[in-house]
Image (cartoon, rainbow, N blue to C red):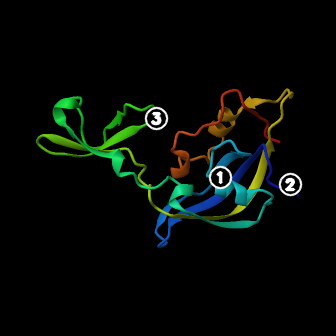
Amino acid sequence: MDKIKKNTLVSMLIKLEDEEGNIIDDSEELMYLHGGYNQIFKKIEDELEGKKAGDTFHVVLTPAEAYGEYDEALHVKELLEDLPEDITVGTELDGEEEGIVYVVERIDEKHAILNANHELAGVALVASGNNPRFVGRIRHKSRRIKPVAQVFQRAHCVRKWPFLRKGLKPRHGAVAVVA
């Protein structure tokens, strides 16, 4: 029976909760490329290393291991006159630093409150699941290669999970073969 190891395309059932047991996300299935490609939290990936079909897992993530601590410096009040005219609550604005995106949380007569913290920053998470299964292996010199993104798009079970919303995507040029 195959075990999960580097360059394995993995499909699994997973549930993400906060420490009080409130369900944050409970999907039917998640698929990712195992092996340090930053497609899933490192601590979860470490826990899944060596697992086989039917195994279960339970991982507690500190805020630092998940979306980071809440950073007050990323929660700011800006004058409306300094922002685009057409902003509304929920509008995303690029920050001055690359990769920082602010979300407009509130607007009053003269100001807008912007927040670049992830919605789960500062929250400890519990990830649990079962049935991780081997779907395929990455192979380099094969006639049946496909870009990883194509494999993921073809798999109807892939969803936007909170821990994948960080913009982490397969590296360009990576190839996958579904066995």
Identify the amino acid type marked 2: Asp
- Label 3: state its secondary structure: loop
Q: How much space separates mark 3 and mark 1, taking CA atoms? A: 20 Å
Q: Position of residue 105 (x, y in %)?
A: 27, 47
Q: How much space separates mark 3 and mark 2, taking CA atoms? A: 38 Å
Residue at the spot of label 1: 42
Q: Position of residue 73 (x, y in %)?
A: 35, 47
Left or right of 163 in this view: 88? left
Residue at the spot of label 2: 2
Q: Position of residue 53 (x, y in %)?
A: 78, 60
Q: What's the mark number on residue 99?
A: 3
Q: What's the mark number on residue 121?
A: none
- Mark 1 vs mark 2: in front: 1
Quick one: label 1 or label 2, which is nearer the N terminus?
2
Quick one: label 3 or label 2, which is nearer the N terminus?
2
In terms of depth relative to the viewer, which is nearer, 167 or 136?
167
In terms of depth relative to the viewer, which is nearer, 51 or 177?
51
